[in-house]
Amino acid sequence: MAAVTIGSMELQLLVGPCRVFALSCMVDVTIGSIKLQLLVGPCPVFALSCMAAVTIGSMELQLLVGPCRVFALSCMADVTIGSIKLQLLVGPCPVFALSCMAAVTIGSME
């Protein structure tokens, strides 16, 4: 990751052919005022190396711009039991369209 700030312009870039493990297996558990964030499995993630998050003033752009394969991100399961909330990523699921996604937020307009 490379984080660059020029004046009011901030860029956070993931710019290499990087393999990230366990990020797709995050479990968020909240019990009362106790919050746990756990990484619980060796899960390969490929598209993170092609993400570019750019913030210029009040304009924010989040771009996925390469031929990227993402695994397990499409299998999120949100489970709430009483005050316990679980967010699970539970399967090796390939996602291809994320490499063509462009999310742009300008003020309150997205």
Image (cartoon, rainbow, N blue to C red):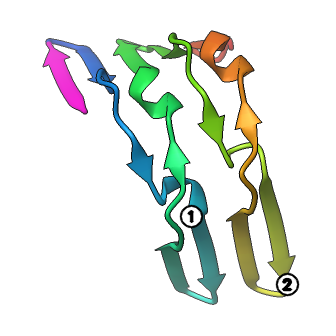
Q: Amino acid at mark 2?
A: Ile
State whether residue 49 appears in this view. Answer: yes
Q: What residue sits 49% from the left and 63% below the top?
A: 42
- Residue 106 image position (x, y, % from top left): 56, 10
Q: Main secondary structure of the magenta part?
A: strand
Left or right for 86, reference 25:
right
The answer to which of 47 and 92 lies nearer the viewer is 92
Say which mark, if any, is on residue 59.
none
According to the picture, the residue beneath numbered tag 1 turns out to be 26
Tell me: residue 86, above or below residue 73: below
Q: Does the rendering let one see residue 102?
A: no
In the rendered structure, which segment of residues is drawn in magenta? 1-6
Please state the horizontal and vertical placement of residue 32, each as a whole percent of the image.
63, 89
Which residue is the site of mark 2? 81
* Residue 4 belongs to magenta span: yes
Q: Amino acid at mark 1?
A: Met
